[in-house]
Image (spheres, grey):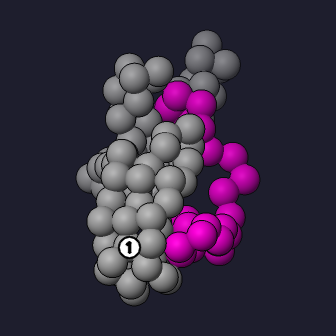
Amino acid sequence: MFRTIVLVCVILGSVVSADPNNKIPTHRSVDLKVGQSVVVNGYRGECGSRPNNVDPNRTRNTKLGILSNGEWGVTKSRTCGGWTPAVEVIFTAKKKGRETIEVAGTKIKVTVR
């Protein structure tokens, strides 16, 4: 019984820490102007749990811009069978061009004008 209560608290605690009203989109392509930012996808953890080791200050350079982590929310997952906690991945355009980036296993075509 005690294990069941602890397990339920852990699961509910991880879901509560993600904002269920922040539905994180998964884009296959985005079209931006230099200086614009858009949430392109979300990193999720195990189904029902927040991803481990998410550094809110982490940034990653791409050919045309920067990927950074954003707010907590939820993303729809076919693997999990519904909504699961995730953190936003934001692309900020820095220069014009076209590239394909991969975020959380999803390829996203980026056009910056």
Residue 48 colored magenta? yes
Q: Where does residue 61 sit, x and y in percent of width and height?
A: 65, 71
> Please, is residue 112 above or below residue 71 in the view?
below
Q: Residue at x 65, y 20 (%)?
A: 2
Pointer 1 residue: 112
Q: Where does residue 67 sit, x and y in percent of width and height?
A: 56, 67
76 horizontally vs 57: left or right: left
Q: Nearer the viewer, residue 87 or 48?
A: 87
SS majority, magenta: loop
Residue 46 colored magenta? yes
Q: Where does residue 38 sit, x and y in percent of width and height?
A: 36, 68
Instruction: Say if residue 37 shows up in the picture.
Output: no
Q: Amino acid at mark 1?
A: Val
Please report the bounds of the magenta region as a residue range. 45-72
Q: Nearer the viewer, residue 57 or 110?
A: 110
Q: Residue at x 56, y 38 (%)?
A: 105
Residue 71: quadrant of the picture: bottom left
Kindly give the residue lying farthest to the front in the view shown.
97
Residue 5: quadrant of the picture: top right
